[in-house]
Amino acid sequence: MSLTHINLLVVDDHPMVIEGMKAMLQQIPFVVLQATAQNAFDALSVLEKNPHIDVAIVDINLPDTSGIELAAKMRKAFPQVRVLAMSTFKERSYIAQMIQNGAIGYLLKSASQAEIEQAILAAYEGKLHLSMDLQVNPRDVVAASTTPLLTSREKEVLLLIAEGLTSPQIAQKLFISLHTVDSHRKNLLTKFEVNNTAGLIKTAAKYQLV
């Protein structure tokens, strides 16, 4: 395949990951890293300002919204951008949700430069790429059951609820307001389709989230 270059966006909230990706991508001659973003809001802003982005590598675990939700927003607003998910998670449910929300591939953060290069090329060509370290069948991934989509903060609140902390204790531990904790609690109950804390913990345990 002959091409001049593939314009790339990397979305990850860890500066060290961003720097590592920059260094690795510089070694791939056909890739031009146009921009980086540390959250979903900035990622969408970058895409609005740069219509020439071809591929976006998106971390699943972002601070303001999950990479899964971001993938869905990108598919709707910027359908021309190919999304490659990148994560430490190997769970089939996460992979399935990313694919169902528009991702064209799923990479583990342990992926080699050669695999990242291969995944970017596959994404650019519109071909599905799943990390070689994932012991999953692409058909199984697409058919996998869905797990509730949680933000990083919701996951923190959920774990503290499971530990038995009260809302005031959670607010103090996370340095957030009681109102914010209550808002996260309500969101968790809604997302897990339960009416109380006991049901929340039981359902979260079923999904192996606590």
Image (cartoon, rainbow, N blue to C red):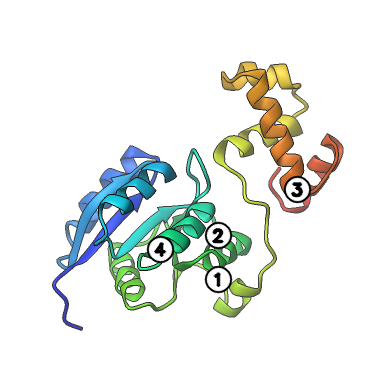
Image position, residue 84 (x, y; %): 40, 63
Q: Earlier in the sequence, mark 2 or mark 4?
A: 4
Q: Is residue 160 above or below residue 99?
A: above
Q: Tell me which amino acid carries mark 2.
A: Lys
Query: Is the Cβ of the residue at disc 3 closer than 8 Å to that at disc 2?
Result: no
Residue bearing the label numbered 3: 192
Q: Is residue 44 above or below residue 182?
A: below
- At horizontal 29% and vertical 65% (from top left) the residue drawn is 54
Frontmost of labels 1 and 4 is 4
Image position, residue 35 (x, y; %): 25, 49
Frontmost of labels 3 and 2 is 3
For mark 2, give the secondary structure. loop
Q: Residues within 10 Å of mark 1 (few under 14, many from 20)?
A: few
Q: Earlier in the sequence, mark 1 or mark 4?
A: 4
Residue bearing the label numbered 4: 84
**Cα–Cα gap, marks 1 and 3:** 27 Å
**Left or right position of 78 against 197:** left
Residue bearing the label numbered 1: 135
